[in-house]
Image (cartoon, rainbow, N blue to C red):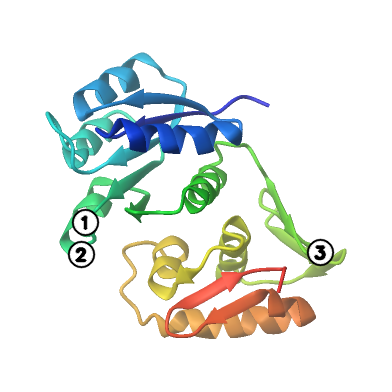
Amino acid sequence: MEIIKILVVDDEARMRKLVKDFLSVKGYKVVEAADGEEAISLFMEQKDIKLILLDVMMPKMDGFETLKLIRQYSDLPVIMLTARSEERDELQGFNLGVDEYITKPFSPKILVARVEAILRRSGQDREENLSAGGIVIDKSAHQVSIDDTPVDLSYKEFELLSYFLENKGIALSREKILNHVWNYDYFGDARTIDTHVKKLRAKMGKKGEYIKTIWGMGYKFDIEG
C-alpha cells in the first residue's frame, strides 16, 4: 500500500517532533515546516502530500493565511492545531475550508485517530470497507451487514454509522456529528442526532449497545464496553 505523506506545520520544534513520532509509528511519512511560508513551499514542491496538520499561531504567515493559499490550489484534508478555542476562530477556519480542529494541549493518540478518520473519509487511504464487532460497512456499495445479515439503513443512518466506525473510541459531541454527517451548513436542532441514533440502535439490534451515550455531550462507538 502507498505510504501516506503528511505535512506538519508548527513553529515549535518540540511539538513537530511529538506529532512526527506518533505518526511515524503508524507508518506515515512526515515532512515538517516551521512556519506558513515554508509550508507553502513544501506544499507546492511535494505534490504527494495527502494531509496537512497546520498550527494557527505562527510567525511570518499564520495558519489562516496559509490555509487560504492552500485552498486556492487544493482541497486536500487540513487539520488545524490551535491553542485558542474561540468560536469566531473556528468559524473562520471552517469558512476557509478546514476539515477539523484540535485544541492544544491534545492527546497524541487522539490526534492520530483523527488523522486516520479524516484520511478514511477523504478516501486517501483507499479503504472502502469499515468493520468492527461483527458490523461491516461496504462504502462503495453503500451496504451494511451485521453478523453477515444485511441491514437496511436510510442514507443518514448509513452516514452516521460510518462516522461512528471511522471514529471508534472517540467521544463525539452532537455538534461535531452534525457538522460531519449533516455538513457545516446545517442549522437544525442537535436533538435530531438523538432521533437518528435511536432508530439506528433499533436496527442494529444488540449491536446497538456499541453506540454509547455520553451524557451532556454526545456519543461514542465502543465495542470494548
Q: Nearer the viewer, mark 1 or mark 2?
A: 1
Using the image, determine if residue 117 lies above or below residue 132.
above
- Residue at figure coordinates x 63%, y 83% from the top left: 199
Q: Residues within 10 Å of mark 1 (few under 14, many from 20)?
A: few
Judging from the image, what secondary structure is the residue with disc 1 in? loop
Specify whether residue 134 is in view.
Answer: yes
Which numbered disc flags the more N-terminal residue, 3 or 1?
A: 1
Looking at the rendered structure, which numbered label has been put on residue 134?
3
List x then y, in percent, for residue 200. 64, 78
Question: What residue would you read off at disc 2?
Answer: 87
Using the image, determine if residue 222 lies above or below residue 204.
above
Q: In which quadrant is the C terminus drawn?
A: bottom right
- Residue at figure coordinates x 47%, y 21% from the top left: 48
Judging from the image, what secondary structure is the residue with disc 3 in? loop
The residue furthest front is 14
As measured in the structure, the alpha-carbon distance from the residue carrying label 3 to the one carrying label 1 is 40 Å
**Labelled pair 3, 1 in contact (Cβ < 8 Å):** no
Looking at the rendered structure, which numbered label has been put on residue 35?
none
Answer left or right for 148 relative to 90.
Answer: right
**Labelled pair 2, 3 in contact (Cβ < 8 Å):** no
The residue furthest left is 60
Answer left or right for 126 relative to 16.
Answer: right
Q: In which quadrant is the N terminus drawn?
A: top right
Q: Which one is nearer the viewer's eye here, 100 or 157?
A: 100
As measured in the structure, the alpha-carbon distance from the residue carrying label 1 to the one carrying label 2 is 9 Å
List x then y, in percent, for residue 209. 70, 80
> Given the image, on which type of amino acid does mark 2 rest?
Glu
As measured in the structure, the alpha-carbon distance from the residue carrying label 2 to the one carrying label 3 is 39 Å
Q: Which one is nearer the viewer's eye here, 102 or 73?
A: 102
Question: What residue would you read off at disc 1?
Answer: 84
